[in-house]
Amino acid sequence: MNHQTSHQPLDLRFGGVTVRDAAEGDFEAIAALTYASYVEAGHIPADDDYVAQLLDVPARAQGPGRLVVAELDGAVAGSTVLLTGEMDMAEVAHPGEFEFRMLGVAPAFQRRGVGRALVATAENHARALGCSAIVITTMASMTDAHQLYRACGFERWPDRDWSLGERGWLEPGERDETFLAFVHPLAPRD
């Protein structure tokens, strides 16, 4: 499997939202909307080490997976990374499963179908690759995301929840947090 999850260029339309492969000219907008979605929305403190990863869009574009953007009204409105469970960047997907990470939607474009279009793109890719499920983890505070995932067919799977502490990613004295797993089992297509 190619590290981009597909050999075909991406250009999908969901209503007025277009989802396509990210280009270098999108990186600044992706960093801004990701920062807004995670830090400005109050889910991660600005001094958290993870913020550097969220802002390192070139690494996401070059790393395993496929960096995509959603455009609406001629602007980059959202972004996510598409992965298979075999890729190093996958947090919870097992081999044969699909995962998306760092999904963010710019505040001005929220509740306009951008997140749903990104999730639908992940589902399209997962089905095309024959994956058995799509898996995502999210923070407990991201309740709007939980609603979106449930509306898109995901179910909470607490047995797949994980924490930084159990993975050995905490410094002494840091507060641990449990990340919630959502799974969308994919039935084989007829």
Image: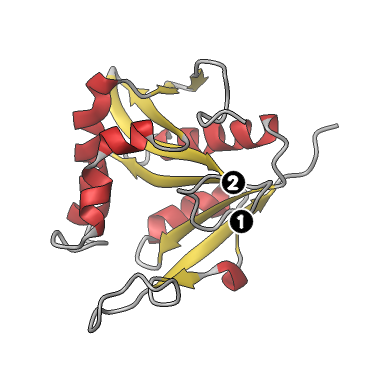
User: Is residue 36 shown above or below 66?
Assistant: below
Q: Position of residue 178 (x, y in %)?
A: 42, 73
- As drawn, the residue found furthest toward the right would be 190
Specify the quadrant of the image occupied by residue 143: bottom left
Specify the quadrant of the image occupied by residue 77: top left
Q: Could you say which is closer to the camera, residue 112 or residue 18?
A: 18
- As drawn, the residue found furthest toward the bottom would be 173
Let me know if residue 168 appears in the view: yes
**Cβ–Cβ under 8 Å for marks 2 and 1:** no
The quarter of the image holding the N terminus is top right
Label 2 to label 1: alpha-carbon separation:
17 Å
Task: Provide the residue designation for mark 2.
Answer: 86
- Find numbered disc 1 in the image and state the secondary structure of the residue it sits on: strand
User: Is residue 186 shown above or below 69?
Assistant: below
Residue 14 located left or right of residue 187: left
Amino acid marked by disc 2: Glu
Q: Earlier in the sequence, mark 2 or mark 1?
A: 2
- Find numbered disc 2 in the image and state the secondary structure of the residue it sits on: loop
Amino acid marked by disc 1: Val
Q: How is the image coloured?
A: secondary structure
